[in-house]
Image (cartoon, helix red, strand yellow):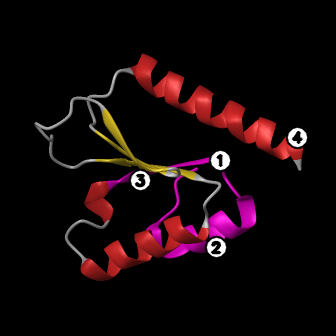
Amino acid sequence: MHTPLTTLPAACDQHRPGVVFINEDCFIHDPANSQKIKLIINQHPKTLFIVFMAIANIHFDEYLLVRKNLLISSKSIKPESLDDILGDYLNKEVKDVGAD
């Protein structure tokens, strides 16, 4: 599902997604949008937010887990790495739900 930044908070509240993919281009040049993204990420600690960087970073090749629910990724991440990340995260979430 493609959701504009303006409707992302409501979509996250309604659907409670396990994972949200965000292109850095949608907020990097607008401080207000950057703040909105930060707020959304903070309000949804059980959702994994994967932000794809607009410009390649020489400091890492694929991804960097910044917080429990925030992963910064290069657009050149290998599909296998993304599969592993998503599989591990979603399996953990299923176990956590079962423990409730």
Residue 11 located left or right of residue 71: right
Q: Which image quadrant for residue 11?
A: bottom right
Badge 1 element: loop
Pointer 2 residue: 10
- Using the image, tell me which numbered label, if any, was put on residue 43: none
- Mark 3 or 4: in front is 4
Badge 3 element: strand
Mark 2 neighbour density, 10 Å: few (under 14) some (14–19) many (20 or more):
few
Amino acid, disc 3: Ile
Amino acid, disc 4: Gly
Marks 2/1: CA–CA distance: 15 Å
Amino acid, disc 2: Ala
- In magenta stretch: residue 60: no
Badge 2 element: helix
Mark 4 neighbour density, 10 Å: few (under 14) some (14–19) many (20 or more):
few
Start and end of the magenta stretch?
1-23
Mark 1 neighbour density, 10 Å: few (under 14) some (14–19) many (20 or more):
some
Pointer 1 residue: 18
- In magenta stretch: residue 6: yes
Marks 2/4: CA–CA distance: 26 Å
Q: Which image quadrant for residue 35?
A: bottom left
Residue pictured at 15% horizontal, 40% vertical? 56
Pointer 3 residue: 22
Query: Taking 64 as reference, is 47 above or below it?
Result: below
